[in-house]
């Protein structure tokens, strides 16, 4: 996956409930549907903008993703969709001891293109939803998406 414009399957966002902000979305003229009540695109640079309310974050891929997870963890209210690369520095720095719950999605997602069509191939890797804040933890438990929910925020046994 080299391009950034891989859109979240809309059924996932629908199942998780309404979001106030998607800070990394295609521009309004290029997206097939809204993912939140307000959006920032690459033209705005969502990382340079103030964030508010309940945030949806399927971040740009690659090393850049860590900066978005760091920002969401600091914001403390939202859900991220990332690859379940649980061994990475990003996961250890911004997920394992900062998030409140995870939903490991069963199977592999088919992301969507900006024309709204579903990609023929699956993402090639497992995905996980990462919840920050109690209402988002609750959403992972009640959303009905297929997978396994893991509550976090217990004391790590070792560093
Ligand atoms: C993986 S896609 C997810 C799109 C959408 N949030 C969703 O869930 O369907 C990542 C998006 O981040 C956008 N993006 C990349 N850099 C950005 C930046 N600095 N500020 C805002 N958006 C950015 C890309 O254009 C792309 O639309």
Image (cartoon, helix red, strand yellow):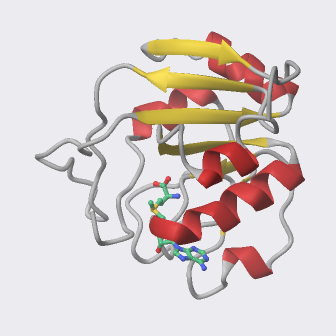
Residue at the (52%, 69%) spot, across then down: 63
Residue at horizontal 76 percent and vertical 21 percent from the top: 152
Q: Position of residue 23 (x, y in %)?
A: 67, 65
**Residue 92, visible in the rendered structure:** yes
Residue 106, given in percent of the width and then of the height, sits at 36, 19
Going by the image, does 124 lie left or right of 36? left
The image quarter in which residue 22 lies: bottom right
Looking at this rendering, what residue extends furthest in the bottom direction?
Answer: 43
Q: How far across and down, in percent of the image, does residue 25 sit?
A: 53, 66
From this viewpoint, which residue is outermost toward the left?
120
Location of residue 67 (image quadrant): bottom right
Q: Residue at x 56, y 23 (%)?
A: 103
On screen, 5 above or below 45?
above
In the displayed structure, would residue 126 be above or below residue 45?
A: above
Tell me the quarter of the image containing the C terminus: top right
Nearest the viewer among 14 and 97 is: 97
**Residue at (62%, 53%) from the top-left corner?**
89
**Res 24 quadrant in image:** bottom right
Considering only vertical position in the picture, is 34 above or below 44? above
Q: Say left or right for 17 vs 106.
A: right
Marker count (numbered): 0
* Residue 21 position in % (x across, y down): 72, 56
The foreground one among 34 and 132 is 132
Residue 22 can be seen in this image: no
> Quick one: quadrant of the N terminus?
bottom left
- Name the side, left or right, on which 2 lies relative to 101: left
């Amino acid at each position: 996956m080299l391009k950034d414009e891989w859109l979240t399957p809309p059924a996932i966002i629908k199942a998780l409930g309404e979001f106030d902000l998607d800070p990394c979305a295609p521009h309004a003229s290029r997206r097939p549907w809204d993912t939140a009540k307000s959006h920032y695109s690459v033209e705005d640079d969502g990382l340079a903008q103030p964030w508010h309310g309940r945030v949806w974050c399927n971040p740009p891929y690659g090393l850049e993703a860590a900066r978005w997870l760091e920002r969401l963890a600091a914001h403390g209210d939202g859900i991220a969709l990332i690859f379940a690369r649980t061994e990475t520095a990003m996961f250890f720095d911004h997920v394992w001891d900062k998030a409140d719950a995870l939903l490991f999605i069963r199977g592999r997602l088919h992301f969507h293109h900006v024309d709204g069509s579903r990609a023929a191939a699956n993402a090639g890797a497992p995905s996980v939803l990462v919840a920050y804040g109690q209402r988002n933890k609750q959403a992972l438990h009640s959303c009905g998406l297929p997978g396994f929910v893991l509550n976090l925020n217990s004391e790590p046994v070792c560093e």
